[in-house]
Image (cartoon, grey):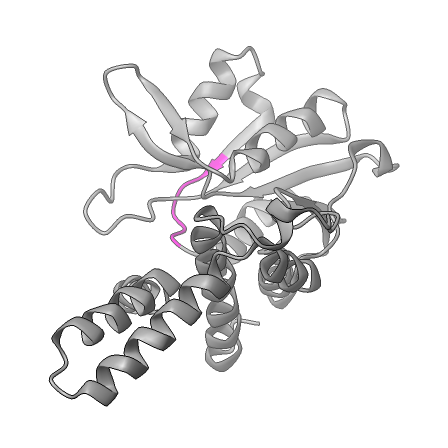
Amino acid sequence: MFFIVSKILSFLISPLTWIVFLFAVAVFAKKAVRKQKSLKWGFACLIFFTNPFFFNVIMGWWELPATKINAVNEHYEACVMLGGTIRYMNSEMSRPVFGQAADRYLQSIELLANKKVKKVILSSGSGSILYKDAKEADFLKAQMIRLGIDSNLVIAESNSKNTYENAVESAKILKQQNINGEVLLVTSAFHMRRALACFKKQGVDAVPFCVDQRSGKQMFTPDKLFIPDTEKLSDWYLLIHEWFGYATYKIAGYI
């Protein structure tokens, strides 16, 4: 039930949903005052949520700093990579099609290749209501093996459907593998606060390894100050979804 409700709320908290709703009210409202207010707020939201400068400032405040590979001085028994990297599985090509969070996957491979970690735990089941058997961790492990990585170095945790379950299921695997020390936690910089809190709640001594940063150095050029960028609608959705998720997890006692 929690999983289904979260999917519905994900739609409702999208800035694009708000903008469409406001313009729809402006079109269909019978009262002139309501039309004007809805149109005004619709344009205001559109301008704000497509502005790169505002987004970069606020996302930069929320994200934890990204981590450099060469800044990892210790050698860890394992890293846990949280899923969300695959958009869908292309059955005709027999390979996953990656989305914006693919950096999680690539950086985990690099950690393994540079011997910063001995094993990679891929934590991600199916995040789909319809395709419950499409387990992301299984797809990623299969691809890693095709890339020549020893299957003994990759563990697929494919039962979890959200960040809380990532932590619960990964904690079980760490216990089974007798890994009691620190582990690297690999996820997007904007997602690390909630992920880290979930893992610590489960008694896992996780060290953040932030990737996939969405903010960056502030640039005072016209394209970064004034020109609307429609991609920011998607980025804002991720950030608002993360805020909502953090608050929900706090109330539920997951963190």
Image quadrant where residue 29 sits:
bottom left
Percent of width and height locating residue 120 = 61, 33
Residue 31, magenta (yes or no): no
Let me know if residue 170 appears in the view: yes
In-front residue for pair 243/225: 225
Q: Residue at coordinates 76% horizontally, 49% vertically from top-left?
A: 182
Q: Is 227 displayed left or right of 128 in the figure?
A: right
Region in magenta: 156-161
Q: How many numbered discs sit on the rendered protein?
A: 0
Q: Is residue 252 above or below residue 86?
A: below
In-front residue for pair 244/109: 244
In-front residue for pair 97/78: 97
Image quadrant where residue 5 sits:
bottom left
Image quadrant occupied by the C terminus: bottom right
Q: In this view, does 254 lie above or below 124?
A: below
Q: In this view, does 73 lie above or below 66?
A: above
Q: Residue at coordinates 29% horizontally, 37% vertically from top-left?
A: 134
Residue 160, magenta (yes or no): yes
Percent of width and height locating residue 85 = 46, 38
Percent of width and height locating residue 104 = 58, 37
Q: Is 32 displayed left or right of 252 in the figure?
A: left
Prevalent SS, magenta region = loop
In-front residue for pair 33/190: 33
Q: Is 16 displayed left or right of 151 in the figure?
A: left
Q: Is 155 displayed left or right of 89 in the figure?
A: right
Let me know if residue 188 appears in the view: no
